Image: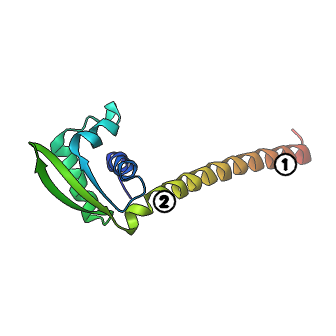
Amino acid sequence: MLTRRENMVMKAVYELCDGTDCCLISRSDILSLLPKKAEMNGRNLDDMLFALQVDGYFDLITSERKGERMYVITLKESGFAFRRNRTQRRRDVMFKIALAFLGAVATFVFGLILRGIFGQ
């Protein structure tokens, strides 16, 4: 399970790769796609990308080009499945909310039935 920041970084990487298995990305490209509330800097981004690499989302090669750090990212199966996993997680949460709502309605109706039977 990814943290909120890892999820934001992975979403940015997935968008920048645009469905291809390999892409060349600069640090500023990733940081520009992250929301302002993420408050990420270059060092945090490097740590986050390394953690995602260790988790098996992609292979990562770093290099320098004209003084700017560049990343060569090759998505793995987990990286390609990122969007599907995110959609599935959202669907699971909505199902749990709906189930809790139905349970609350059933409990309310059951309470009304009991109140009608035993009178109050």
Q: Which of 70 and 108 lies nearest the eye of the viewer?
A: 70
13 left or right, relative to 64? right
- The disc labelled 1 sits on which kind of residue? Leu
Q: Position of residue 5 (x, y in %)?
A: 32, 45
Q: Position of residue 64 (x, y in %)?
A: 11, 50
User: SS at mark 1?
Assistant: helix
Q: Residue furthest left?
A: 67
- The disc labelled 2 sits on which kind of residue? Asn
57 left or right, relative to 41? right
For the rendered model, the colour scheme is: rainbow
Specify the quadrant of the image occupied by residue 20.
Answer: bottom left
Specify the quadrant of the image occupied by residue 26.
Answer: top left
Q: Position of residue 56 (x, y in %)?
A: 31, 66
Count of marks, rendered view: 2
Give the position of the C terminus as an image quadrant: top right
User: SS at mark 2?
Assistant: helix
Give the position of the N terminus as an image quadrant: bottom left
Mark 1 vs 2: CB contact within 8 A: no
C-alpha distance separating marks 1 and 2: 43 Å
User: Which of labels 1 and 2 is toward the front?
Assistant: 2
Task: Give the residue drawn at x 57%, y 56%.
Answer: 92
Task: Give the residue drawn at x 30%, y 63%.
Answer: 74
Name the residue that disc number 2 marks: 85
Q: Which mark is residue 114?
A: 1
98 left or right, relative to 47? right
Q: Position of residue 46 (x, y in %)?
A: 18, 50
Q: Residue furthest top?
A: 36
Q: Which of 18 and 80 lies nearest the eye of the viewer?
A: 18
Q: Residue furthest front?
A: 66
Task: Give the residue drawn at x 62%, y 48%.
Answer: 97
Q: Earlier in the sequence, mark 1 or mark 2?
A: 2
